[in-house]
Image (cartoon, coloured by chain):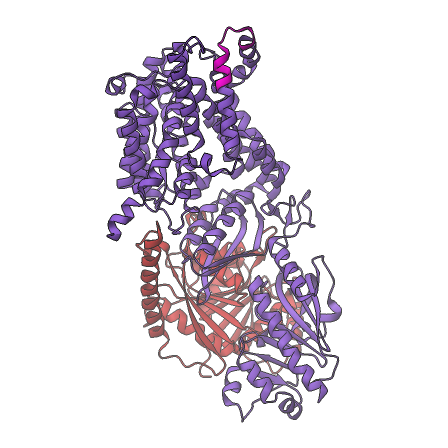
Chain colours: A purple, B red
Amino acid sequence: MNPKIKRITQNIFPGFVVSLVALPLGLGLALASGVPPLAGLISAVVGGIIVSILGGSNITIVGPGNGLVAVTLAAVLTLGGGNMEQGYLLALAAVVISGGILLLMGMLKFGALSDFFPSAAVQGMLAAIGFIIMSKTLHLMLGAPDVQADSTIEYYFKLPATIHQLQTGEIPWLAGILGLSCLAIMILTSKIKWKLIKLIPAPMWIILLGIGTSYFSKMYPQYLAPLPESLMIQIPENVFEGMGFPDFSKLGDSQFWGAVISLTFIAGIESLLSLKAVDKLDALKRRSNANKDLRALGIATIVSGFLGGLNVVTVIARSSINANYGATNRWSNFFHGAFLVIFVLVFTPALQLIPLPALASILVYTGYKLAEPAGFVKVAKVGWQQLLIFIVTMLGTLFANLMIGIAAGILATLLFQFKAFGRIRLFIRYAFKPNTLLYEETPGVYLLSVKAFSSFVNFIGLKRKLDSVPPNSQVIVDFSLAKFVDYSVLEQISNYYQSFKNYGGDLEIIGLDDLGAYSAHPLAPRLAKADGASKSTLSKRQKTIRLYAKKLAWEFKPQKDYLEEEFEPFAFFGTRIIDSGRNRLTGKQGQVGVLMVDIDYHEGEFIAQENRHATMVILDLKQEIPRFVLDKEDLLDKVAHLAGFNDINFSMHPDFSENFKLKGQNTPELHQFFDNELIEFLQSNKPFHIESNGNALLIFEKERLGTLSEIKQLVSFATRLAVILNSKHKK
Amino acid sequence: MGEKPFKNIAIAIAESPNFEANIYESIRIKKMIGQQLFLIHVGDYDAQLEKRIKEVIASSEGSVDNVEIVWQKGDPAQVILEVAKQKNIDLIIAGAMPREGLVKYYMGSVARRLVRASNCSILLMTHPSKLKSTCGCMVVNGLNHPKTSHTVKMAIRVANSFGARKVTVVQEVAPKMVSTKIEDENSIAKLQEEKAEIERCEKERISDCMKSEVLNTGLTVEQKCIFGKKGYTIGHFAETTKADLLVMNSPDTKLGFLDRVFTHDLEYILSELPCDLLIVHSKKNRKG
């Protein structure tokens, strides 16, 4: 088959499966938002078609979003002043304008917007949205469509009353049973591995069960009393009849603009977060163009609003189904929209048989997924501070509104960081100063150094630098000049780690071992000498070194250690003061003892003190060898006291003499020591700084901490050198 | 080695814990890069102090000649600037101030005024007591600016005189110079091409600057093209690579109060010295 056509046809099936999920979800989300059910499908159809043509992503699916349920419902209620019909039309105007703003944001390149919010606050906001979605739909699932309450919490307080009504028979028992068994289907299908059941997504099973029940009760009312009209979905015979047209009469109202801002904010955040998550699912490892996608979503939202639909956002659950079923490009998004059109036009009579409790169960499950206890536990593991931020945001969202909730979360995060950093003025000063440096250290290896502190406040600079690195190269993120690194940054960097790995590159973090962690979690914020921060937590780098030690059957000790005895005899430390060592790796190669350590030392004293950290190896030779210093170039002058050391050249190896600078005292002995075998070995390896103090060798590469691969190279070089020196010993 | 890069060097001395160290250090520097040293004492003539200064000078290593002590009363910065004019000074040595917290050094008010108002080069020392140290690695700015050519040449001369091992010319390229915006995987490839082209042009430009300069044996000159905020990036680079001396162009305009509020170019480095700093003054009438 023509590959061009194949690229299109292979996306028909994923598009079909997604539409099976999108149909019930679209109807349900619209229902929960307080608008006619078809509004949800309109946004899915319009979005699917427009974004598949104009979008900048590959395998994302767009449509009505979970997060927007809360804001849309609030907009309908406040704008309509109790009149849902009127509120819907006014909310449509807000949808159209929010689409315009999203389009503008895309044009102004606001694609990085979602990175400006602290992770814990965003997670808290999503949990709150989960509670909001569940609050009303729980009643609906149990068969009570008309429960009214002024706040989310009140809905929960009214639950016992609804259950009581179910017990007394005020609500038909069939509604409750249907709702609960549909919820059971939602929960169980994710746990069952039976292929036959898995073939059809759970929401579609629920639709089939719902329609089947309604059909049965209609045919045989003597066995099963049909559900009342109020518990059936309202879809007009002629679907075009139901479409609303936006009412722009409240343009001057502040409440209207409040609704516009909330819609825009949530639509933007939800889309961008989903986009990032979906990119990780792409089998072809493409990077989406967030700004282009934002523009397409904006246009789709405008059109959807004019046709009576909701905001169009990128949705994570439907997109991941899309990826699972093998979608390769935007055509699946298009087909999902197209199938929805067919469903609505052809199967309208069947759709009218869907009972509301069945639909509501899907939403209860969706809401539960957002607010599930596992989410709390996940944040709590990072540390109590993050949990506090999470809860503040969640409660702010539940008791006030989304904007106040997220603002409270940001404020809580800032307060926590002010306290951690110690000095507010300094924090603010650095928040607006550049603090990152990126350069190519050696071809294909980039060093990204971060100074002062790194948090969600100044993450954008770090992100820009990371984005500009070719993804197939190796990046070393060096935090050794930073005093504080927060959870949002570490979480984002762990995402980057994944994407670099996907492209065959690599990302390693160094300089975090020095900072104390707030908890045992790998992404816990880290702060220098913090109160409350413990030093006992191993960083990822330390854990990988430990693993490496295990493989070599060597000993690994991460604790702080004092090493003057071992290191002081070397000329390099003649003018430097050793503070301590960490991450000590010890082993043996034949006669020779090998010691690798991250060593902290400083130059100068008092105000002139400059702290340094480097990874070094010592070979304890247990034999006398001549004293010398060998280096390729620039570190030689760092060895200040070389009194009586001469430059030593080898007439037999002019290329070696040219590349390496060797200094020593006893020339004849050195000529003997550096025999052909040793010189050839040195020439065939990366140049290291090697120094002999008479009976031990000091080996290191750079005056900074090594990454795991650098450590492996260093240790491998040292052990191979030890083998050569062992053989000399025997002679 | 050729001619020394500077003729007349001046340093202000005062009785402080660093008094002796400052004199030793300035004599050492003068021996390497200058001909005549002026020790400026702001205040009245003091016979006892003169005796002490002379003792310190006499006790320094090797022979010392061409050292003159100047006594003058007045506002420190003004005195130094006046003497600089009278004695035709072309390099002033000044000390940086330590600062608590994150930043280790910054410019004291006197040094800042010197940078703003002087018509000669300035060497800002962060380690007045670091006597034994040698200057191993130097970092030089390679901005696309008429002054750069002279600065790079001076830096190489200074590196030769100091016996430095390595000079890295850092060309900072503002990210907005790159027209490609990273949005998806295609633009990353395009960006790399564009960057490579910019890097090639930058290399050529700096190589032109250095053409006529002779390098000492043992001195290597490297070029590094870094994309980042101008003025900030080079300081951060000097810090991570542990450079001993950073060489910069003199500011185009006299720095004023507004420059501190809206940090730019040199101001980033002045507010947070990563290491010793040499600001090379380029005279307008000087060619190249």
Rendered view: A172 above or below A646: above
In-front residue for pair A575/B119: A575
Left or right: residue A521 versus residue A442 is right
Which range is magenta?
A166-178
> Percent position (x, y) of residue A296?
29, 38
Left or right: residue A585 versus residue A307 is right
Residue A167: say if magenta.
yes
In-front residue for pair A448/A519: A519
Q: For residue A303, what is the image quadrant?
A: top left
> Percent position (x, y) of residue A473?
44, 61
Q: Residue at x 30, y 19 (%)?
A: A349
Q: Residue at x 33, y 57 (%)?
A: B191
> Percent position (x, y) of residue B268?
47, 54
Q: Residue at x 55, y 72 (%)?
A: B135
Q: Residue at x 62, y 62 (%)?
A: A613
Quarter of the image with the C terminus of chain B in it: bottom left
Whether residue A154 is visible here, answered yes or no, is yes
